[in-house]
Amino acid sequence: MENGNPKKYDLEDRTLKFAKNVRVFVSNLPKTVSNFEDGKRLVRSSGSVGANYIEANEALGQKDFLMRIKISRKEAKESRYWLKLISVVDNTLDQIRLGLLQESTELMMIFSAIMRKQK
């Protein structure tokens, strides 16, 4: 129990889980040229969401913090783009893709809320 809040959700853990889930999803995609290229971009952007959030937590000041939060939001938005482009024919994979789209949208909204509070 940290700060008396037993349900405190660690955003670092959530972004890490998102990046790991993306990697599992990409590894199960049909092996097409477009999925290979789009999958590489998706893996990069999904990992960057959490990496920049970690950097924000170690920021040198408020401007640095805000810039890194903006980058995290941008990377979550980019992840959404690649998730929309990736081609899946399997219904199970499509359900996973939709879940990842939802998570990237929620992360974007969380980072937007953090940005609003900092201004």
Image: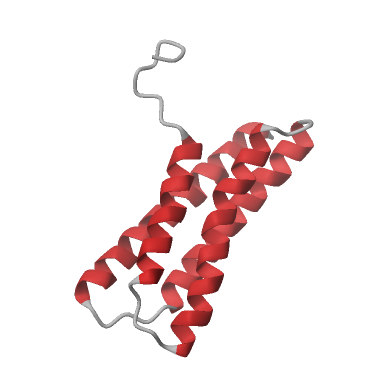
In this rendering, the count of numbered labels is: 0
In this picture, residue 33 sits left or right of residue 31: right
Image coords of residue 63 (percent x, y): 78, 37
Of residues 8 and 110, which is closer to you in this image?
8
Which residue is found at the position 33% from the left and 72% from the top? Answer: 28
Which residue is found at the position 51% from the left and 68% from the top? Answer: 42
In this picture, residue 30 sits left or right of residue 105: left
Q: Which residue, as the protein is rendered here, is positioned at the far bottom?
A: 33
Which residue is found at the position 35% from the left and 18% from the top? Answer: 6
Query: Is 109 drawn above or below residue 29 in the view shown?
Result: above
Image coords of residue 79 (percent x, y): 51, 64
Question: Dividing the picture into quarters, in which one does residue 31 lie?
Answer: bottom left
Q: Quadrant of the N terminus?
A: top left
Q: Which residue, as the protein is rendered here, is positioned at the far left?
A: 91
Which residue is found at the position 25% from the left and 66% from the top? Answer: 95
Query: Is 81 drawn above or below residue 85 in the view shown?
Result: above
Query: Is 34 drawn above or below residue 79 in the view shown?
Result: below
In this picture, residue 54 sits left or right of residue 28: right
Of residues 93 and 85, which is closer to you in this image?
93
Image coords of residue 119 (percent x, y): 69, 35
Render colour scheme: secondary structure
